[in-house]
Amino acid sequence: DAGVTQSPTHLIKTRGQQVTLRCSPKSGHDTVSWYQQALGQGPQFIFQYYEEEERQRGNFPDRFSGHQFPNYSSELNVNALLLGDSALYLCASSATSGGKGDTQYFGPGTRLTVL
Amino acid sequence: GNSVTQMEGPVTLSEEAFLTINCTYTATGYPSLFWYVQYPGEGLQLLLKATKADDKGSNKGFEATYRKETTSFHLEKGSVQVSDSAVYFCALQTGANNLFFGTGTRLTVIP
């Protein structure tokens, strides 16, 4: 059973460019969340997708947008890249039970470097 | 609001030593609590969790008890191994289902 997969593994962009990161959830999971982890910090919640809609959003600007496809996979798009967007971007998937504490399983991350 | 405060690292221990990493939280409502571990160059792996007060989560010799009265979820292991060297993150999850993480504690175990 494949876990959460992310692509690409590493990415280098320049300021002002746009980037798309991809995530495939664990089999049986329908919810995808994205997190940004700056160097030496804990992950920060960006947004969560369920049933192809953004269900929740953290404190990130509109330059960060996403999408979820019918097969539950997801993309994170970042426009007008800034140096401060350099980070490890983590995708997590979960199976929505309707109760509290749906466990999130993380992928290996995409390391984005903005020059 | 929701927040997690973790013991600052780094923590360096000799093999077979006892480990405690402190974690306290502030939350609206009654959150679920988690410990995740991150090995070098990798994503996060779930280590253990507890969903209600007095629950004890355990896995691979690690354990943590959800203490509502002290708003704590301290991670412990009786005898650490070199392979336990990693960064440990405490996190809480509210009914809204997004995770709030602490800043992480780096553990290095020396032979």
Image (spheres, coloured by chain):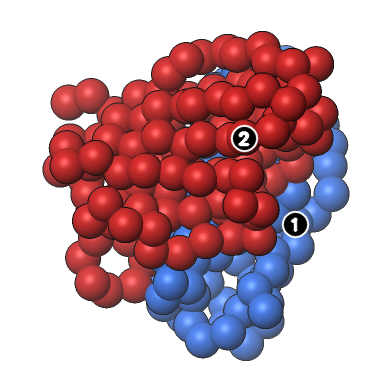
Residue B24 spot, x, y in % from top left? 70, 69
Depth check: give the residue in front, A46 or B80: A46
Residue B3 spot, x, y in % from top left? 69, 68
Q: Which residue is mark 2?
A: A79
CB-based contact (under 8 Å), mark 1 and mark 2 = no
Residue A37 spot, x, y in % from top left? 66, 38
Depth check: give the residue in front, A82 or B35: A82
Depth check: give the residue in front, B53 or A54: A54
Q: Which residue is mark 1?
A: B6
Screen quadrant of the C terminus of chain A: top right
- Chain drawn in red: A
Q: Residues within 10 Å of mark 1 (few under 14, many from 20)?
A: many
Residue A57 spot, x, y in % from top left? 52, 61
Q: Indicate which label's residue lies in the foreground, 1 or 2.
A: 2
- Chain drawn in blue: B
Left or right position of A102 against B56? left
On residue A6, the disc is none
Depth check: give the residue in front, A59 or B49: A59
Screen quadrant of the N terminus of chain A: top left
The amino acid type found where label 1 is placed reads: Gln
